[in-house]
């Protein structure tokens, strides 16, 4: 049986033009941005806590049913997405 050819491995070189560092021009986030971000997360948490504790007394909240989870977690997800732009 004939012997198969051995392939030569090509050397992997990093292109130095693609590795130039980029200076970040934006400064730290404002306190308003951080406050809104934390506010969204806390509002979502409070929405779920109020739903569990007082849904029987609040008829409009009880009428929403499972949508309360969507609303509460939606607020928290918006806050978490905002953390990606936080500096």
Image: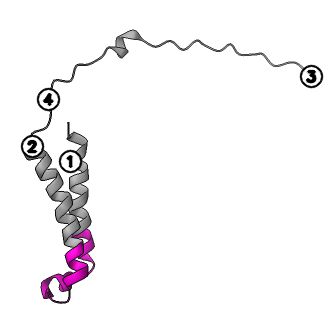
In which quadrant of the rendered image does the N terminus lie?
top right
Distance Cα–Cα, label 4 vs label 1? 16 Å
Farthest residue, direction right = 1
Task: Write down the residue under mark 4.
Answer: 27
First in sequence: mark 4 vs mark 1 = 4
The residue wearing badge 1 is 82
User: Taking 53 as reference, is 31 above or below it?
Assistant: above
Looking at the rendered image, the disc whose residue lies closer to the viewer, 4 or 1, is 4
In this rendering, the label closer to the viewer, 2 or 4: 2
Q: Nearer the viewer, mark 2 or mark 3?
A: 2
* Residue 6 placement (x, y as % from top left): 76, 16
Under tag 4, what secondary structure?
loop
- 13 with respect to 25 (left or right): right
What secondary structure is the stretch in magenta mostly built from?
Answer: helix
Query: Circle 2 sits on which residue?
Result: 31
Secondary structure under the numbered disc 2 in the rendered image: helix
Badge count: 4
Compared with 62, 82 (above or below) is above
Query: Which corner quadrant holds the C terminus?
Result: top left
Is 6 magenta? The answer is: no
For marks 4 and 3, the one nearer the N-term is 3
Pointer 3: what residue?
1
Residue at (36, 15) in percent of width and height: 18
CA separation, marks 1 and 3? 64 Å
* Horizontal side, residue 64 vs residue 19: left or right: left
Above or below 79: residue 25: above
Q: Nearer the viewer, mark 1 or mark 3?
A: 1
Distance from label 4 to label 3 (Cα)? 67 Å
Return the disc, 2 or 1, that comes first in the chain's sequence: 2
The residue segment tinted magenta is 49-71
């Amino acid at each position: 049986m004939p012997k198969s050819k051995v392939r030569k491995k090509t050397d992997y070189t990093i292109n130095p033009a693609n590795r130039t560092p980029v200076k970040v021009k934006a400064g730290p986030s404002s306190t308003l941005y951080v406050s809104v971000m934390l506010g969204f997360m806390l509002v979502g948490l409070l929405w779920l806590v109020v739903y569990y504790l007082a849904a029987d007394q609040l008829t409009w909240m009880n009428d929403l049913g499972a949508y309360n989870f969507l609303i509460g977690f939606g607020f928290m997800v918006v806050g978490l997405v905002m953390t990606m732009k936080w500096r």
